[in-house]
Image: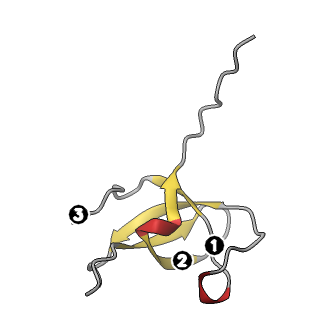
Amino acid sequence: MSHVFKLNEDVRHQPQGPQGRATTEPPMIYTIVQHMPIESDGRVRYRIKCKSDKIERIVTEDQLSYFSDVPIETKT
């Protein structure tokens, strides 16, 4: 299994509450700064840095999604 997200790519991080429960916090935009070793159970990890704050986290791939700053056009 390999890393899906590339270094310096902007991603959306969905925080998790205690014991994996979903939180009500909105997702924040982070930048991938490092590919971490894959865990023994096969989960892919990344070090990410917040775009707006000086926060870094290590997260698993399932907590991330692609981010596009291009607005989605709506049909009229």
Q: Residue at x 40, y 67 (%)?
A: 33
Choose the circle earlier in sequence order: 2 or 3. Answer: 3
Residue 42's place in the image compared with 1, above or below, is: below
Question: Contact (CB < 8 A) between labels 2 and 3?
Answer: no
Left-right relation of 13 to 8: right
The residue that disc 3 covers is 2
| Disc 3 crowd, CA 10 A, few/some/many (<14, 14-19, 20+) | few
The residue that disc 2 covers is 56
Residue 75's place in the image compared with 15, above or below, is: above
Residue 47 pos. (x, y %): 43, 74
Q: Residue at x 70, y 14 (%)?
A: 75
Q: Secondary structure at mark 3?
A: loop
Q: Amino acid at mark 3?
A: Ser
Residue 55 pos. (x, y %): 60, 76
Residue 19 pos. (x, y %): 61, 89
Name the residue nearer the viewer: 12 or 40.
Answer: 40
The numbered dot on residue 15 is: 1
Q: Residue at x 60, y 39 (%)?
A: 69
Choose the circle earlier in sequence order: 2 or 1. Answer: 1
Q: Quadrant of the C terminus?
A: top right
Q: Quadrant of the N terminus?
A: bottom left
Name the residue nearer the viewer: 4 or 22.
Answer: 22
Res. 52 image quadrant: bottom right
Q: CA distance from mark 1 to mark 3?
A: 22 Å
